[in-house]
Image (spheres, helix red, strand yellow):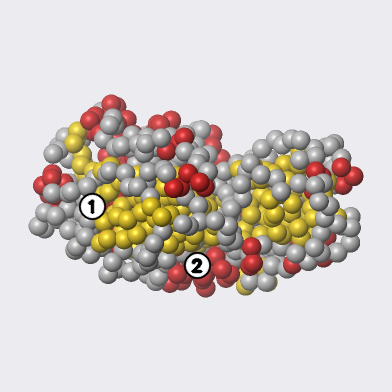
Amino acid sequence: MILAATAVATGALLAPAALSAVNATPAAAATTPVQVYLSSESTAPGFGPSSGSWFTDPATGLAATPYKLSKQADLTTAAASGSATITADTGTHYQSVLGVGSSLEESTIYNLSRMSATARTAALHKLVDPVNGAGFSVARIPLGTSDFTSRAFYTYDDGSADPSLSRFSIQKDIDYKIIDVLREAKTINPNLLLFGSVWSPPAWMKNNNSLLGGSLPDSNIPVLAAYLRKAVTAYAGQGLPLYAVTMQNEPLFSPPDYPGMTLSADQERRVATALRGELNNNGAASTKIWAFDHNFSDGPGYTAGVLGNPGSPSDAFNAVDGVAFHDYGGDPTSMGQVKASYPTKDVAMTERAVWGTSGADRIVQYFRNQSIMYEDWVTMLDQNRAPEQWSGSPDPSMLIQSPSSPDTYWALPDYYIIAQFSKFVARGATRVQTNNGGSGSTTNVAFLNPDGTLVTVVVNQTGSPQPFTLRVGDQQVAATLPAKTVGTYLWPGANSGTGTGTGGNGPIDSSKWYTVKNTNSGKCVDDANGSTANGAAVQQWACQTGSANQQWQFQATDSGYFKVVSRNAGSAVWDVTGGSGAGNGAKIQLWAYGSGTNQQWKPVAGANGTYTLTPRSNTGACLDVTDVSTADGARLQQWTCTGGAAQSFTLTAQ
């Protein structure tokens, strides 16, 4: 039962049958088989989730694990009858999914680097390959060292005070093979997104001149912003663009034995503002800034200190794209609370290892509370729980390596359980409405993939099989989920009928044309004078049935964003005049699409099926009718999101 890494990369995981080719119509739901995959906990005595036995004898525990991403017989749909355990409303939509993954911190990279080249490649395939592996699509990397490292603690500018950052260098990341391993992972899965977090800035920036503990003097806020920006651009220079950065790992905790620092919410507000300027002015405007990066319990209060209160945004509101959370205190509902208060901001679950079916249910709750992602923490330790420099005793990582034979490692049940999400829920999938159930039976979360497949993950934490019925519209399937098992059910073309969007890309169909009507004026977004030229004004005008200059197609780009194409002007799209650096009052025009962030828009649901529309270039701004006008010819502009009716729109398919 010992798995050599070279044997893992090929054929160890099953690819969902024809999943990438599915684009069924709603009628297909009645005839398309539902695919089923299962993963379970071990039944071996002493091998419960997170047990230390997994370090000493993983083979025994794996031999008694009934399901490891195991393909089951397809289910057949039938006409709905009786009561349903799970009812999915595919017309009611929430957040758009960024991905699921696990960290590539230095402990993991050190162990991967101990392998032969062939074995390391196979292990990376097992992690990030979307066909033959788990398809992990998001990876967190420490910028400098964390507590999980084999190295002496370091930053990118150690030594005496260097406020000009003249010594800044990521050479140690190159020397320690971090860059090489990340590049190989990106080669295997080009859609892998990296995001970075700092555990501590250089000691000379801090009040105690140490990497351990301490705080940041206000005078070094601009220096820290420049340091973070340099990390982003240095990684980009290695072919590793960072999707996002958090400004301080766990800013409310001062660890006594590994790098860390407290950073108040007010300080983080100022760092965010300075960092956004640094990024925008140095070719890194597309990198997102995520605030907080700490526990649920403190999230709402800290977020308000950074972003301001709803309706009264701070100067950092436009700088920050989302709020990151850890799960070591509090409840996932804090993410939903933050999302409700700041609907244009993403919430992201960026650190927590989970084990077994209770861990799978925790992932369910993260997504049900609006997280765009789940990120596991620490991917591979060896059987000696090494390397690491945390004062505690680590629980099992999803991969455990033999210390004496580095090419040998074991993938624990938790790897397969997390893959029940990562392998099947595609980037850009939208969470849809389901009733959750309870821990005494089953819990669940469901997503509508961009190809039209409904992906429902069902968790049975109990010690006995649990029968359930999954219903979508007038069709249903009946299934029984074994004890201590997670099931993923793939239903191509499932459609419950018309519903209302409540977030993410909602029910928007990229093949259709829409009118976009302002809630305040009742008038439609319009291509002024039917122009087809670059620079044509985008305005509001009385709605005219069948008018091509009032019809728009939302063509998906990525991460829930769309380019909005004019039916009248062909390839021209909504464009924020002045580009990515434009501020309040920048008018919207039509311009040939060039992949600019000022040409991509995210629909964010409001009440009663309405949307606000946020430009990717300025995520604190919304599409807005100038001066709250109700007149024909009033220009569309971007303006700080207020929640007002002049920023609310209804999309109607033509």
Circle 1 SS class: strand
Q: Residue 147 versus residue 516: which sits nearer the camera?
A: 516
Which of the marked residues, 2 or 1, is nearer the chain's N terminus? 1
Amino acid identity at mark 2: Gly
Q: Which residue is mark 1?
A: 40
Observer-side mark, 2 or 1, equals: 1
Residue 643, image x, y percentages: 69, 67
Q: Residue at x 31, y 37 (%)?
A: 14
Residue located beneath label 2 in the image: 336
Can you give x and y, in whole percent of width and height, for residue 313 in the image? 66, 68
Residue drawn at 43 percent across, 30 percent down: 187
Is residue 277 shown to the viewer in this render?
Answer: no
**Residue 583, located in which quarter of the rendered image?**
bottom right
Q: Vertically, is 165 above or below 303?
A: above
Q: Nearer the viewer, residue 105 or 130?
A: 130
Q: Give the Cα distance between marks 2 and 1.
A: 29 Å
